[in-house]
Amino acid sequence: MCKNGKLYEIFMLRYNFTGGLPENYANCSSLERLQLNNNLLSGRIPDGIWSL
């Protein structure tokens, strides 16, 4: 998902996605905005997300 560890924004709003967030989102060192409103996500949030 993150080419060379760089991804700035992820907007996935109102898609009714299910399941969890991929662990590799935590490898995106430049991630500034992650919006996942109005989906049906479940499971845990990757630990590394909180340190981005």
Image (cartoon, helix red, strand yellow):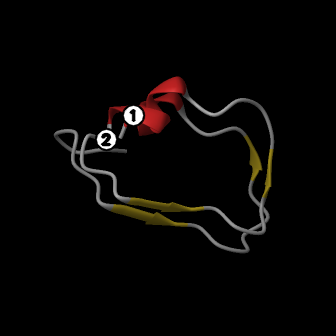
The residue tagged 1 is: 51
Mark 2 and mark 1: Cα distance apart in space: 10 Å
* 13 w.r.t. 39: above or below: below
x and y, in percent, of residue 49 in the image: 47, 37
Q: Position of residue 2 (x, y in %)?
A: 30, 44
19 displayed left or right of 51: right
Q: Amino acid at mark 2?
A: Cys
Q: Give the residue drawn at x 33%, y 52%.
A: 31
* Image point (44%, 28%), residue name: 48
Residue at point 35% right, 40% down?
Answer: 52
Q: Nearer the viewer, residue 48 or 3?
A: 48
Q: Which residue is rendered at x = 73% and y = 74% of the image?
A: 14
Q: Amino acid at mark 1?
A: Ser
Residue 46's place in the image compared with 20, above or below, is above
The residue furthest top is: 47
- The image quarter in which residue 3 lies: top left
Crowding at mark 2 (Cα within 10 Å: few <14, some 14-19, many 20+)? many
The local secondary structure at tag 2 comes to: loop
Residue 38: percent from the left, percent from the top? 78, 69
Q: Where the N terminus falls, by quadrant?
A: top left
Residue at the bottom extreme, as displayed: 14
First in sequence: mark 2 or mark 1? 2
Front in this rendered view, residue 2 or 29: 29
- Residue 28 is labelled as 2
Left or right, residue 10 beside residue 21? left
